Image (spheres, grey):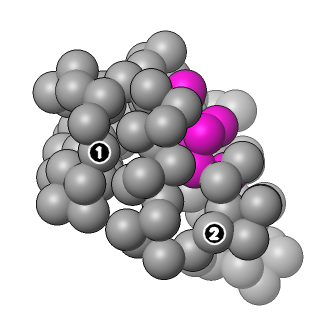
């Protein structure tokens, strides 16, 4: 095991926040994933929270979907892209553990 990662995990437990002991990604975000995340944060920060409106905003901004490469966003595509990306991040975490 990695002593540094083990110490971070122990420190999270020591602060009575065990749920944070292994909160991390198993890999860095791909550029398209990071671009989607940044766009979503900007859209949400602007007060848009309705998924249909979020999809419309992503389409207007021509944000490229990380998995499909599409830019014609819909609620269904948003769900598919987020679910697929989350599954890939979960798999990377399962393979690589704490921290990318």
Q: Position of residue 88 (x, y in %)?
A: 23, 38
Q: Is residue 75 visible?
A: yes
Of mark 1 and mark 2, the one earlier in the sequence is 2
Which residue is rendered at x = 41% and y = 70% of the image?
A: 51
Q: CA distance from mark 1 to mark 2?
A: 15 Å
Q: Nearer the viewer, residue 16 or 40?
A: 40
> Label 1: few (<14), some or many (≥20) within 10 Å?
many
Residue at the far top: name it. 31
In the picture, the disc for residue 73 is 1
Magenta stretch secondary structure, dominant: helix
Query: Is 5 on the left-hand or right-hand side of 75?
Result: right
Query: Is 43 on the left-hand or right-hand side of 29?
Result: right
Q: Position of residue 57 (x, y in %)?
A: 51, 49
Q: Position of residue 95 (x, y in %)?
A: 25, 33
> Label 2: few (<14), some or many (≥20) within 10 Å?
some
Q: Nearer the viewer, residue 31 or 50?
A: 50
Which residue is rendered at x = 49% and y = 15% of the image?
A: 31
Tag 2 secondary structure:
loop
Residue corresponding to mark 2: 48
User: Is residue 27 located in the magenta-colored stretch of the structure?
Assistant: no
The magenta segment: 35-41
């Amino acid at each position: 095991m990695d002593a540094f990662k083990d110490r971070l995990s122990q420190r999270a437990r020591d602060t009575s926040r065990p749920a944070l002991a292994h909160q991390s990604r198993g890999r860095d975000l791909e550029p398209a994933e990071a671009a989607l995340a940044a766009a979503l944060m900007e859209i949400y920060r602007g007060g848009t929270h309705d998924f249909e409106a979020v999809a419309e905003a992503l389409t207007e901004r021509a944000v490229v979907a990380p998995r499909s490469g599409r830019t014609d966003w819909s609620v269904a595509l948003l769900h598919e892209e987020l679910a697929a990306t989350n599954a890939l991040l979960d798999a990377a975490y399962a393979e690589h553990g704490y921290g990318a």
